Amino acid sequence: MHATTGDQLLMHGRTVGQHDRVAEVVEVLGTDGEPPFRVRFEDGHEAIMSPGPDTVVRHDTDLPK
C-alpha cells in the first residue's frame, strides 16, 4: 500500500452495521510512501496507522476538487 500526503484512507466497516471511516494522510512515516501513516479523521482525531486489507487508498489526484 502506497500513499502520499493529502490522500485519503477509506476503511471499510468489518461487521454489519459498522460504518466506513475516512482519514486524511497528513504524514507518511514509512519509506517510499509505505506505512505507517499519520492520519486525521473527520472528527479531528489523529493517529498513526498501518492499514489492513480492509482499507483502500484514495489518491489526492482521484479526489474531487
Image (cartoon, grey):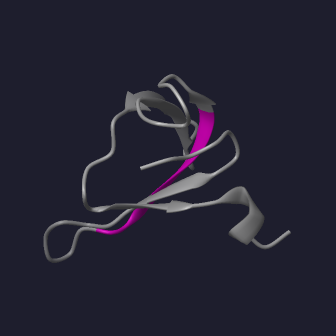
- Residue 25 image position (x, y, % from top left): 59, 41
Identity of the residue furthest to the right in this view: 65
**Residue pictured at 72% horizontal, 58% vertical:** 60
Does residue 52 sit above or below 37 in this rendering?
below
- Residue 7 image position (x, y, % from top left): 64, 51
Within the magenta stretch, is there residue 29?
no
Picture quadrant where residue 54 is located? bottom left
**Which one is in front, 40 or 50?**
50
**Horizontal placement of 12 versus 44: left or right?**
left
Residues drawn in magenta: 19-26
**Horizontal placement of 21 versus 28: left or right?**
left
Does residue 22 sit above or below 3 in this rendering?
below
Identity of the residue furthest to the front in this view: 32
Within the magenta stretch, is there residue 20?
yes
Identity of the residue furthest to the left in this view: 15
Please give the count of numbered marks on the rendered protein.
0
Does residue 25 sit above or below 55 in this rendering?
above
Quadrant placement of the C terminus: bottom right
Main SS of residues in magenta = strand
**Residue pictured at 68% horizontal, 39% vertical:** 5
Picture quadrant where residue 18 is located? bottom left
**Which one is in front, 44 or 36?**
36
**Residue pictured at 76% horizontal, 64% vertical:** 61
Identity of the residue furthest to the bottom in this view: 16
- Residue 64 image position (x, y, % from top left): 78, 73
**Which one is in front, 15 or 43?**
15
